[in-house]
Image: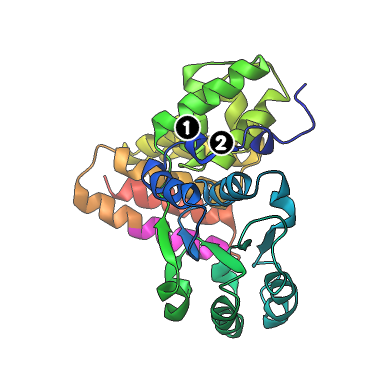
Amino acid sequence: MFEIDLWTEKYRPKKLKEMIGQEHIVERLEAFVKNNSLPHCLFSGPAGVGKTTAALCIAYEIFGDEWQNNFLELNASDERGIDTIRTKVKDFARTIPLGEKKFKIIYLDEADSLTADAQQALRRMMESYSNTCRFILACNYSSKIIPPIQSRTAVFRFSSLPKEKIESYLDMIANNEGIKIDKKALDAIIYISEGDMRKAINILQTAASTSKKITEDIIYSTTSRADPEIIRKMLEFAIAGKFIKAREILLKVMLEQGLSGEDVVKEIHKQIMNLDISDEKKVMLFEKTGECEFRITEGSNALIQLEALLAQFMLAK
């Protein structure tokens, strides 16, 4: 059995140079750390690509053993109002840093969830306490951060991690934990995680709780995701005019495997590009898939909508 501790924390890098896949950002941040200086920063990018890790690494390297006393982490999606900015953030920012350092660091995760009023209050605070505190804001969408804050920060745009980097890191974890994982299982994790390292490590840990020898089937069963090969086979039957066989696969996926309609329609969307049909028909099927997904999220019966979608694939022939 795996350890109680989360592997995402156990294998989190402690230094910037240990981070993978963000070399262009690490190089810039290391220059600031080396000079014992740091501007206000805005980390923008998808989930699970190293934004929080980068902020913690900066704190480890600048403050050393005193990092916890000089570093405040808040999740703006939980505490998104102006009161949080005026109380917790202000109280921490106004006090002098411990030790010989010249500033503290406040890390606001999911800063794009802050209300407009809270962002305006934060803008003013970044000006007032710049002598004793540096702000690092992390967000998925930098466009949701007001321009006055963007202009006061150095922007670092994180990108999704490449397949090779995730694969090598998962191999390292598997070797350390005494787990055997085959190539198809690794590919399945990378496919499901979509460049999100945190998600990939959590999938590996979940799968390792069931078996020390991880296969592709274990990955899809533990993540409750549709197998791409099965979904593509279902669509190929529909395109070939074999509606009954396509429907049988759909029923098996939804009733026996217990997948939701949204899970199935999302995998259908991914597999359309792999079908051997013209671009014009792919465009039409993308449109029909979008309509199906909308109806399901609005509360329509998922099975009926997916059967209707398979009928559209058959008509596309």
Q: Earlier in the sequence, mark 1 or mark 2?
A: 1
Q: Which mark is residue 94?
A: none
Q: CA distance from mark 1 to mark 2?
A: 8 Å
Residue 254, image quadrant: top right
Q: What residue would you read off at disc 1?
A: 166
Q: Position of residue 22 (x, y in %)?
A: 42, 43
Q: Position of residue 267 (x, y in %)?
A: 46, 44
Kindly identify the residue that appears in the image at 47 percent across and 76 percent down. 149
Magenta portion: prevailing SS class: helix
- Please state which of residues 213 and 140 is positioned toward the viewer in this rendering: 140
Q: What residue would you read off at disc 2?
A: 200
Kindly identify the residue that appears in the image at 51 percent across and 27 percent down. 169
Q: Position of residue 125 (x, y in %)?
A: 60, 79
Label 2 element class: helix
Residue 159 in the image: above or below residue 130: above
- Please state which amino acid type lies under the numbered disc 2: Ala
Magenta residues? 287-298
- Please state which of residues 185 and 221 is positioned toward the viewer in this rendering: 185
- Please state which amino acid type lies under the numbered disc 1: Ile
**Residue 64 appears in the rendering:** yes
